[in-house]
Each structure stands twice: as C-alpha cells, then as structure tokens.
Amino acid sequence: MNIEITKDNYEAVKKDILSPYMQDFVEALLNVEPRYIMYPIKGKEERVKQIERIFAYEFYHQYRLIMQTKPDLYSGIYLNGEISKADSIYDNVLKCYPDLVLHGDPGKIENGKQYFLCEMKTMDNSNDYKADLKKLTELSCSPLKFQNYIFLAIGDDLQNLKEKIEDFTPYCCNILCICISLDGKKVGCAHLSELR
C-alpha cells in the first residue's frame, strides 16, 4: 500500500485501506481543518507554527465524532490519548505514552482488541521522526500485539518522510506511515518497508 488520499477520492480508495478502524483514522484526518495543522502565533511577528497537541486534540475529536456514528463497530472500544500501559499490566514493555490508542479494555491485553497505537510528530519536529519510529518498532515486537502501529507525520508527505528517515534501520517493519499535508487536503499512507 502506497496511496495518496483526498476528500475527492476517499470513497474510491478506502477499500484499499486495511480495516474499518484505519478507514475511520484517515477520514478523521481529512476532517481536521488546516487551522489545527498550522496554528497562528501572534507576537512581534505574526507567523504560523505546527503544534502537535493542538492537532492531536482536534484529530481525537474528529475520530470520536466518527465513533459516535458507528455504535455497533465501536462498542466496548476505547480511544485514549497519551496513556501508559507500562508499569501496570505489561511487565517487560518499554515505558511509553502513545499519542493515541484504540483498544478494548484499557486494563488488559485482549487478543484481537488492540486496534492501533499511534505516535505523531509535526514536520517542525521532524528531527524526532526516527525516535518515534524506533519506539514503534520496539513496541511492535512487544507483547502488546496491536493490529496497527502508526507513525503520523503532520504537515509532511511520504517523499519527504522517506528522505528524513533514509538511514533508519528498523528491526520490525510492522509500521504504517501516514502523512497529512499542511493544507489538510492530502493523506499519504505507506508501510515503513515501502519507504526503505
């Protein structure tokens, strides 16, 4: 899978996206307005800045809106941000606070109910891309057993992401890389192995 998605082609290409949860992930991204991707900063000079948390809150909100329209699909499923499953029910798992997790009961590992774990970074923090990818590769080899490990690059595209991580060598490649453009109109999806 190496695809570019827009609001115009979403319905036609969504069948190529892995699962209903991943389809909703992309739809929620496309529903985030550009003002949450590029945030105006007022001061001596007016400028825009990418602020991960502002984007993350709006993305979480858009995903929750989709969940509310599909009560049967999302019954007993939780969307949580910045939670830690380490030091509670997971013994040998690296200490991590994922940006976003979609899963069954947050208090236990349930086979088949660990849907996705997402780390996100803005293009302004692209020097940290490799650190998050390293974290995701470690998590993908852990007992968490999520169906999807997602790296979300906010305000970037797949070609630029590929250039920024060209010397990154993962030992597990079960990672889906997703980019959303600065204007919020394009989403690119590719497996990490396809960017190598």
Image: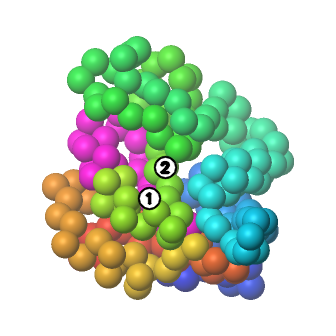
Between the C-alphas of marks 1 and 2, the distance is 6 Å
The secondary structure type at the circle numbered 1 is: strand
> Which residue range is magenta in the image?
134-154
**Crowding near the residue tagged with mark 2, few <14, some 14–19, many ≥20 C-alpha atoms within 10 Å:** many
Q: Residue at x 74, y 39 (%)?
A: 72
Identify the amino acid type marked 2. Cys
- Res 151 label: 1
Identify the amino acid type marked 1. Phe
| Residue 10 shows in this picture | no
Q: Is 97 covered by the magenta stretch?
A: no
> For residue 87, which quarter of the picture?
top left
- Image quadrant in which the C terminus is located: bottom left
Judge left or right: residue 85 versus residue 24. left
Q: At which x and y percent is residue 46?
A: 76, 74
In the displayed structure, 93 sits above or below 121; it is above
In the displayed structure, 22 sits above or below 80; it is below
Q: Are marks 1 and 2 in contact (CB under 8 Å)?
A: yes
| Residue 83 shows in this picture | yes
Residue linked to disc 2: 118
